[in-house]
Image (tube, helix red, strand yellow):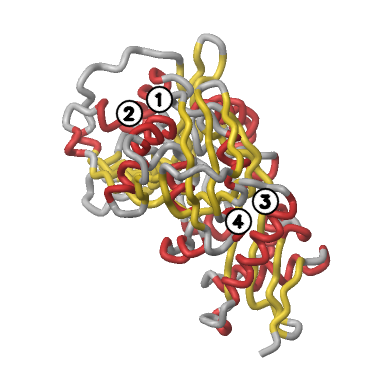
C-alpha cells in the first residue's frame, strides 16, 4: 500500500465529500453537496490517497471561541475520517500528525472538535473541554417551583426571518460563556439547513423569538413529532437550540417549549451542564438528565493558548507539560495571570504541577477542575498548595458549553 497525504485542490472537493460521507455510513446527495461544499476549504483539508482514491481526510475551519474572560482564534476540526477499506493502517494518526504540524506552522494555538468516539482523541492530546447534557421530561411534570414572570413576547417566525434575527442573539450569548464558537455566514445558515431528504422523514422545524423591550433576547428552534397512536395526542418536542441572553429570557423560552399543546414529552440533546431548567422545576427529579463529553480541546501552542484567556484569581504556577504528540509543547512553562490578563513563557524553574497536555486542555475552559483531575491521578502536585492555587486560577463560570456542533 502506497499512501500519499496532501491538501485538496478546488476541483477535488466533490469526490472528496462523497468519500467522506461514505466513511460515515451514508450517501452524499446532490443537494448535500451544495451545502457541504461551503464547509470545505481545500488548502485546509488534508486527504489520504491510495492511487486516485480518497481513503481518509482531515478538514479544518477557522473560527473563534470564547475563553474565560476573552475571545480567541480557534481552528475547528470539522471531520477526521478513514475509509472502511483502510482502517487500522495508521491513516488517522498520520492525518492528525500532519494537521497538527500544519496548525503549528500557521501559528494557531487552539483547536477543537466533536468526537464520534471519545477514545480516539485523547492519544492525540485532546481533552474534554466542555460537557454536553441530554434532557427528557414528561410535559405533565414540568411545573416550575415559582411562576415565571411575564417577560417580553414570543412570536413564531419563518426560517428566513429567523436567520436574520438569531445571529446577534447568539453572539451576545457567546460572549458570556466559555466554549461558545463563532458562526460565520456559512455556519449561520448551515446550522438550521434541512436537506430535501430529511424533510421527507423529519418534522418541519419551528422558530420562536423572544422580543424584549429593546429587541430580541432569545430564541428556540424545535421540532414537533406527532403521535396519535393512543387516540389522545402524545406528540414529542425536540428542542434543537434554545438560547437566552438573560435568565428571564431563558426561563420564558423553556416555559414556552414545555407548554406546547398536544405534547407528552420534551427532549433536548445538547444543553450546558448548568442549564437553569434543573433548578426551575418544582420536581427536578422529573428531568431525566444525562451528561457526556461535548467539545474536545487541543492546545497546539501551550504558552500562547494559556496567555489568551483570563484567570479567576491572581497567581503564578509553573507547569511541567507532557506532550508525546507535539514535541514543541514538552517542557516547563511559568504562567502568571489573573482577571486582567496573563503571560506564559518557557521556564527552567522547579515545577509546581505535572500533567499531560490533554488534561491541561480539559481544564483550559474551566469546565474540568484541576483538583478533579488530580483525584483521578492525571495531575501531580509537586509543591504544597500549588493545586489549590492553580485550581482557583483556572476555575471559570458559567460552565463551558458549545451550542455549535461541527
Taking 176 as reference, is 22 left or right?
right
Q: In the rendering, which numbered label is found on residue 276?
A: 2
Q: Please tell me whether mark 2 sits on a helix, a strand or a loop.
A: loop
The residue located at (60%, 55%) in the rendering is 77
Which quarter of the picture shows residue 346? top right
Q: Which of marks 3 and 4 is nearer the N terminus?
A: 3
Q: Between marks 3 and 2, how big is the CA–CA gap?
A: 32 Å
Q: Nearer the viewer, mark 4 or mark 1?
A: 4
Residue position for label 1: 250
Q: Between marks 3 and 1, how big is the CA–CA gap?
A: 30 Å
Q: Please tell me whether mark 3 sits on a helix, a strand or a loop.
A: strand
Q: Between marks 2 and 4, how big is the CA–CA gap?
A: 30 Å
Q: How crowded is mark 2: few (under 14 residues within 10 Å), some or many (20 or more)?
A: few
Q: Please tell me whether mark 1 sits on a helix, a strand or a loop.
A: helix
The residue located at (23%, 49%) in the rendering is 231
Taking 363 as reference, is 280 left or right?
left
Residue position for label 3: 61
Q: Determine contact: label 4, label 1, CB under 8 Å.
A: no
Q: Nearer the viewer, residue 170 or 70?
A: 70
Q: Between marks 3 and 4, how big is the CA–CA gap?
A: 7 Å
Taking 282 as reference, is 85 left or right?
right
Q: Which of 357 and 292 is in front in this view?
A: 357
Residue position for label 4: 78
Q: Determine contact: label 2, label 1, CB under 8 Å.
A: yes
The picture places residue 32, in percent across and down from the top left corner, at 65, 60
The picture places residue 72, in percent across and down from the top left corner, at 62, 36
* Residue located farthest toward the top when viewing the structure as drawn: 213
Is residue 79 visible in the rendered structure shown here?
yes
Q: Is residue 15 above or below residue 246?
A: below
Q: Which of marks 3 and 2 is nearer the N terminus?
A: 3
Amino acid at each position: 500500500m502506497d499512501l500519499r497525504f496532501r491538501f485538496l485542490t478546488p476541483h477535488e472537493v466533490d469526490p472528496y465529500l462523497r468519500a467522506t460521507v461514505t466513511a460515515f455510513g451514508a450517501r452524499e446527495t446532490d443537494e448535500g453537496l451544495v451545502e457541504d461544499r461551503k464547509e470545505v476549504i481545500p488548502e485546509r483539508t488534508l486527504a489520504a490517497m491510495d492511487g486516485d482514491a480518497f481513503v481518509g481526510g482531515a478538514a479544518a475551519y477557522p473560527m473563534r471561541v470564547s475563553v474565560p474572560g476573552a475571545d480567541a482564534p480557534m481552528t475547528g476540526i470539522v471531520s477526521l475520517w478513514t475509509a472502511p477499506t483502510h482502517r487500522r493502517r495508521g491513516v488517522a494518526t498520520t492525518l492528525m500528525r500532519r494537521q497538527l504540524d500544519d496548525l503549528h506552522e500557521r501559528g494557531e494555538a487552539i483547536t477543537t472538535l466533536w468526537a464520534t468516539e471519545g477514545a480516539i482523541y485523547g492519544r492525540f492530546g485532546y481533552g474534554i473541554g466542555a460537557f454536553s447534557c441530554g434532557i427528557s421530561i414528561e410535559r405533565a411534570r414540568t411545573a416550575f417551583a415559582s411562576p415565571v414572570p411575564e417577560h417580553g413576547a414570543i412570536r413564531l417566525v419563518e426560517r428566513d426571518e429567523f436567520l436574520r434575527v438569531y445571529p446577534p442573539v447568539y453572539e451576545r450569548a457567546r460572549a458570556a460563556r466559555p466554549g461558545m464558537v463563532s458562526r460565520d455566514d456559512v455556519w449561520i445558515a448551515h446550522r438550521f439547513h434541512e436537506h430535501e431528504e430529511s424533510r421527507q422523514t423529519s418534522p418541519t422545524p419551528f422558530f420562536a423569538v423572544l422580543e424584549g423591550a429593546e429587541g430580541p433576547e432569545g430564541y428556540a428552534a424545535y421540532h414537533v413529532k406527532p403521535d396519535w397512536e393512543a387516540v389522545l395526542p402524545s406528540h414529542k418536542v425536540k428542542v434543537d437550540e434554545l438560547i437566552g441572553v438573560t435568565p428571564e429570557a431563558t426561563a420564558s423560552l423553556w416555559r414556552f417549549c414545555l407548554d406546547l399543546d398536544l405534547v407528552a414529552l420534551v427532549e433536548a440533546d445538547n444543553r450546558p451542564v448548568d442549564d437553569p431548567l434543573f433548578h426551575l422545576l418544582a420536581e427536578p427529579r422529573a428531568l431525566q438528565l444525562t451528561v457526556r463529553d461535548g467539545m474536545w480541546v487541543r492546545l497546539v501552542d501551550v504558552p500562547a493558548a494559556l496567555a489568551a484567556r483570563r484567570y479567576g484569581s491572581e497567581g503564578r504556577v509553573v507547569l511541567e507539560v507532557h506532550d508525546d504528540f507535539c514535541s514543541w509543547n514538552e517542557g516547563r512553562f511559568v504562567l502568571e495571570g489573573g482577571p486582567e490578563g496573563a503571560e506564559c513563557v518557557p521556564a527552567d524553574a522547579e515545577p509546581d504541577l505535572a500533567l499531560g497536555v490533554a488534561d491541561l486542555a480539559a481544564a483550559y475552559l474551566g469546565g474540568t477542575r484541576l483538583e478533579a483531575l488530580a483525584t483521578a491521578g492525571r495531575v501531580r502536585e509537586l509543591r504544597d498548595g500549588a493545586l489549590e492555587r492553580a485550581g482557583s486560577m483556572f476555575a471559570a463560570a458559567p460552565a463551558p458549553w458549545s451550542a455549535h456542533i461541527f
